[in-house]
Image (tube, rainbow, N blue to C red):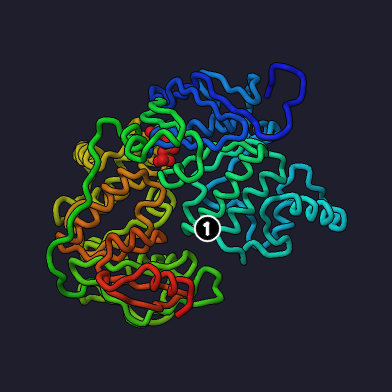
Amino acid sequence: MSIIGEEPLPPGALEVETLGMTMRFGAFTALDDVSIRVAPGSFHALLGENGAGKSTLVKCIMGFYHATSGELLVGGREARIADPRHAHAMGLGMVYQHFTLVPSLTVAENLVISRKDAPAVIDWGKERAGLDAFMQSMPFRVPLDQTVARLAAGEKQKLEILKQLYLGRRFLILDEPTSVLTPDEADEVLGHVRALCEAGEISVLMITHKFREVTAFADEVSVLRRGKLVGQGKVADLTHAQMAAMMIGAEKDTTPAPRSGTTGAPVLEIDGIRALDRSGLKEIDIRSLTVRAGEIVGIAGISGNGQMELMEVLTGQRPLMAGAIKVEGAPYSATRAEAQRLAVRYLPEEPLRNACAGRMSVIENIAFRSFDRKGDSPRFWTSGKEMRARGTELIAAFKVKVAAPDGPIAALSGGNVQRAVLARELTGAVRLLVISNPCFGLDFSAVAEIRARIMAARNAGTAVLLMSEDLDEVMELSDRIVVMSEGRISYEVTAAQASLAEIGHHMGGHA
Ligand SMILES: Nc1ncnc2c1ncn2[C@@H]1O[C@H](COP(=O)(O)OP(=O)(O)OP(=O)(O)O)[C@@H](O)[C@H]1O
C-alpha cells in the first residue's frame, strides 16, 4: 500500500472514492471506468443486476483484485492497496451476507481472535476490561459471554458490524447484509448502521437488491449496469421505479405468471421419515407430506429448523433412519437413474457448491443432466457440438450473463450461477421440482423471471416443493404452506387461508 501524503488520516468516518476504475478479465470488461464517491459519514447504496459488476468493484476497493486501471482515493489521498490486509490497515472493512464468526466461541473470544495482534496467550483480565469498555462505548451491544451459535441471525450480523468497529474500520462495505435476516432484524441492524453514519463514525457502501432498504436507510445511490455506472443520485430524489429503470435499462421486466390448471395425483409422498440433523444430536421427523401434480407446497420456517436436512434427504445426501419416500408411487432414494427416470429436478442452496462443478465450463455444467442421453435413450459418446448448441440456447433463454460460455462456471456472478442451474433443472418435462431459496441473491428482474418459470412449471403439471426463508416468496408462489419448526411440520394451511401473522407465530415455535 502506498498513500501519497505523510500525515495520518483524520479520525472518524472515511471518505472513499474510485476514479475511472476499470477491471478486465481477459477480453471481458467487468468494470468500465467507474467513478463513485462515498462521502464521509454517508450511507451509499450500490445497485445493479446480477453480473453488473458490484462485487468486482468492491473487491477492487478491498484489494482482492487489482484494477486494470483507475485510482482509489481514501480520505482524499491516492491509495494503492496491495491486498485485503492493507485495506484493513487503512480502516476499510467488509461485512458479508454469510457470517464469518466462529460459532463455538463466545462473542468476546470472537472479537479478540479477530485482531491481527491477538496474543498467543490471552490475558483475559486485561482483555475483558478493554472489551467491556468497547461495548459500553457502542450504540448497540451483543452479550460478550454468549456463544455465537446461540445468537439469532440479527444478533450475529450486529456482532459482525461491531467486530469491524472493534478492529478500527471506518469505511464498511456491506455485501447484501440482510439476506439471512428477518425484515425486523434487517431494519434493526440497518438502523444501527445508519446511526453510526450519522454520528460520523463510519461511511458505508452497501450492495443490496432491496429497494426498500435503499429508500429507508441510504442517502445516496449508485447504479451499475454491465460494468458501467449508469446512474447516481440522492435517494430522496429517486423513486423505486426510477432506480429499477436505471438497473435494467431498456430491457423488459417480467410480469408475474398467473396461476392456472388443476391439482392432480400425488407425486411426492413422504411418510414417517426420520434423519439426524447436522449436529448429529437432534432429528428431523416428518410424519407426512404430500405434493401433488400442479401444486406448489411451500415450506416456511426460520433457517436451521431442519429444512436443509430435508433437502439433503430428498437429494440422497443424508441417510434415512426410518420412513419412506415415494415419487409417483415408486420408492425413491434419489439416485441419478431414479431422478432421470422419474424426472425429478433440484435447485439446492448454494448452487455453486452443491449443484455445479466450479472449474468446468458453463456449457458443461448445463449439460450435466443430458450429456449421456439422446432423447429418452442412453448415449454412449457425448456430442460437443450438440452440447454447445443446447447450452448456448439455454444461456440465452435464461439470460445467463456469461463472458465466455467455455469459461469456468465459478467465474460467473452469484446470481448467474443460480440462473445457469435453473436453466438445467427446469428444462424438459419435470415431474417433481425440489427447490431451496431459488431467488437468494437475485436482482428484482431475475426474481420475477425465476418465479414466473416456477409458476409456469406448476401450471404445466410439475409438483413443486419450495423451501424458502423468504416468507413473501412462499406466500406468493404456494398453493399450500407448511411451517417447519425444530425438524417437524408444525402447521399446515392452504394459501387461500394463510395469514402472515399466524405463519410467523408458528415459525417462532409458538404453536
Ligand atoms: N475472476 C473472474 N474471472 C472472470 N470473470 C469474472 C470474474 N469475476 C467476475 N467476473 C465476471 O464479471 C461480471 C461481473 O461480476 P460481479 O460478480 O462483479 O457481478 P455482481 O454485480 O456482483 O453480481 P451478483 O449480484 O450476481 O453478485 C460477471 O459477468 C462475472 O462473470
Return the residue nearer the eye: 263 or 503.
Answer: 503
Quadrant (top left/top right/bottom left/bottom right) for the C terminus: bottom left
Q: Is residue 406 visible?
A: no
Return the residue nearer the eye: 450 or 27.
Answer: 450
Q: Is residue 463 left or right of residue 498?
A: left
Residue appearing at x 31%, y 44% in the figure: 446
Mark 1 belongs to which amino acid? Answer: Glu
Residue appearing at x 59%, y 46% in the figure: 193
Quadrant (top left/top right/bottom left/bottom right) for the N terminus: top right
Ligand 1, what quadrant? top left
Tell me residue 275's x, y (percent).
Answer: 45, 76
- Name above or below for residue 237 compared with residue 186: above
Pointer 1 local density, CA inside 10 Å: few below 14, some 14–19, many at least 20 = some
Residue appearing at x 50%, y 72% in the figure: 277
The residue to which callout 1 is attached is: 185
- Name above or below for residue 24 compared with residue 251: above
Return the residue nearer the eye: 382 or 329.
Answer: 329
Quadrant of residue 198 within the rendered picture: top right
Q: Secondary structure at mark 1?
A: helix
Q: Is residue 140 visible?
A: yes
- Name above or below for residue 412 compared with residue 109: above
**Which residue ends up furthest to the front in the rendered image?**
236
- Name above or below for residue 158 compared with residue 174: below
Tell me residue 478's x, y (percent).
Answer: 27, 65
Q: Is residue 163 left or right of residue 497?
A: right
